[in-house]
Structures are given as C-alpha cells and as structure tokens.
Image (cartoon, grey):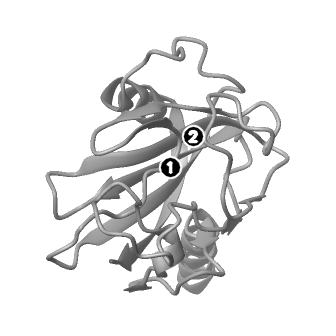
Amino acid sequence: MLITSTVSLSSATASASAFALSSAAFANGGLIPKVHECTSGGGNDPAKKNESPPLAWSGAPAGAKSYAIVMRDLDNANLIHWVIYDIPVSATSLPQNVEHAYRPAVPAGARQIYYRGSASLYGYQGPCSPSTVNTYEFVVHALNRASLTSLTSSSSTQTAAKAIAAASIGSTKITGES
C-alpha cells in the first residue's frame, strides 16, 4: 500500500508539472534571435524587427478559462516588456509577430497592455540591452476566468501583472538571453 501511495503521489506531481511552454525561435535558456530584439535602442541593425517570438504551450490545468503572458527582463528590475491577456482557452500557441495593437487580430479576443518605455506601443517590446546580455522570462498563466474585465486600454503593465497573478491557477515559463 505504501508503494501505491508513492506512485499516486508521483503521478499527481507529474500531472501538476505537465504545463509546459516552448518557442520554435529559441531553446529554454538559449539566445533570443535578433528579429525579436527591440528597434528603439538606436542603431539601424536591419535584423532587429521587434517581432514577438512564437510560443506554444500544453498541459494547462483543467480549470483554465483563458491565458495571459507576461514577459520580464530579469536583469533590469523585472521590467515588464509584454503583457497579453484574454487569450482564449482554445489557444495553445501564439504566432511570431503578434500585431502591435490593443486588440490584435490573432489570437481573436486577446488584449495587450500599452508599453511605456524605450518605445510607446501596444504589445511586445523586445529585448533592448545594447551593452549587456540580459535574461528575459516569458510566463504563460492559466487563468480562472475568461476575461480580466478590470483591465482596460489604459492599464499599466504592473496593474495587469497583478491582476493576472491574482487570477492564475498555474503557470509555465521559459527564459532566453539577449
């Protein structure tokens, strides 16, 4: 009976950790390609296009009603570079280069927070570390509600991150260097 309990615990642990995130653009802990770097840091490198990377997730908690993604620069005071939320529960990925709009066309129904910093735009602001290599974290949160109705087009990234954390029933992450 003790062995059965141990096996059950192991199975429960495996199920709880099944939520996984990956990107076709870079391996976890790997280099983020230049196409995903910001264009607002000066210079005219044509390889830098400020395109969000493609992301794919699987194994979300059964109670998920929507998803949200928060990207942070871990080496710059956890500066938030991207918040996208109200991603439909039917979605299991985001394509490369999500439109810079409050309500991007893909994924339908999603909303993005306005980035106020080295650029001023809705959505993704890529890595902007011209003289250092920083670590960027992408976290997908499974949320307990279909829509974060308290957030609006003028909400800050910090307000959005707090609302997402409060509604999160599970998360998964990957990091990349740039």
Q: Identify residue type, mark 2.
A: Ile
Q: Residue at label 1?
A: 124
Residue 4 drawn at (x, y percent)? 63, 80
* Quadrant in the picture for residue 136: bottom left
N-terminal-most mark, 1 or 2: 2
Classed neighbour count for the residue bearing mark 2: other residues with Cα under 10 Å, few (<14), some (14–19), many (≥20): many
Q: In this view, does 88 lie to the left or right of 60?
A: right
Q: In this view, does 76 lie to the left or right of 72?
A: left
Residue 57 point in image, percent of width and height = 68, 65
Residue to which mark 2 is pinned: 84
The kind of residue tagged 1 is Tyr
Q: Considering only vertical position in the picture, is 173 above or below 161? A: below
Is residue 3 placed above or below 20 in the rendered structure?
Answer: below
The quadrant where residue 166 appears: top left
Q: Which of 169 and 148 is in front in this view?
A: 148
Residue at 59% over, 75% down: 14
> Is 143 positioned to the left or the right of 134 in the image?
right
Relative to 66, does residue 95 appear above or below in the rendering? below
157 relative position to 108: left or right: left
Q: Do the residues labelled 1 and 2 touch (CB within 8 Å)?
A: yes
Instruction: Quote the CA–CA distance across marks 1 and 2.
Output: 8 Å
Characterize the local packing of mark 1: few (<14), some (14-19) or many (20 or more) Cα atoms within 10 angstroms. Answer: many
What residue is at 53 percent from the left and 41 percent from the top? 123
Residue 167 locus on image (x, y percent): 51, 30
